[in-house]
């Protein structure tokens, strides 16, 4: 079991298994990734598949 804090002031604690801790960490990473993608989209920092393929092909050719 792994002890993790569920509050900033360290008064509340919960015991969870390492596998559950890993699952929660992976879920948080996934949600953070989605949030970054949405922020990029809102700023217009997105590429179509065609533009991405062209950029990748050019980068490979420049090597």
Image (spheres, helix red, strand yellow):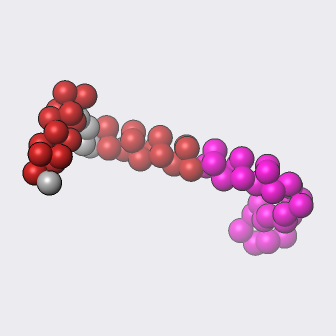
The answer to whether residue 12 shows anywhere in this view is no
Left or right of residue 32, residue 20 in this image: right
Q: Residue 46's spot in the image, x, y percent? A: 26, 37
In the rendered view, tell whether residue 34 sits above or below residue 24: above
Residue at horizontal 86%, vertical 55%? 16
Residue at horizontal 79%, vertical 64%? 4
The answer to whether residue 3 shows anywhere in this view is yes
Q: Nearer the viewer, residue 33 or 50?
A: 50
In the rendered view, tell whether residue 2 sits above or below residue 50: below
Q: Nearer the viewer, residue 60 or 37?
A: 60
In the image, is residue 3 part of the stretch drawn in magenta? Answer: yes
Pick the quarter of the image with the N terminus: bottom right
State how many labels appear. 0
Residue at horizontal 84%, vertical 65%? 3
Q: Residue 48, located in which quarter of the rendered image?
A: top left
Pick the quarter of the image with the C terminus: bottom left
Left or right of residue 1, residue 10 in this image: left
Q: Residue 9's spot in the image, x, y percent? A: 76, 72
Left or right of residue 52, residue 3 in this image: right
Q: Which residues are magenta?
A: 1-28
Q: Residue 7's spot in the image, x, y percent? A: 75, 63
């Amino acid at each position: 079991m792994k002890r993790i804090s569920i509050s900033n002031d360290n008064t509340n604690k919960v015991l969870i298994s390492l596998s559950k801790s890993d699952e929660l960490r992976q879920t948080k990473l996934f949600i953070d990734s989605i949030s970054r993608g949405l922020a990029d989209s809102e700023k217009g920092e997105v590429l179509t598949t065609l533009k991405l393929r062209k950029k990748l092909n050019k980068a490979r050719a420049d090597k």
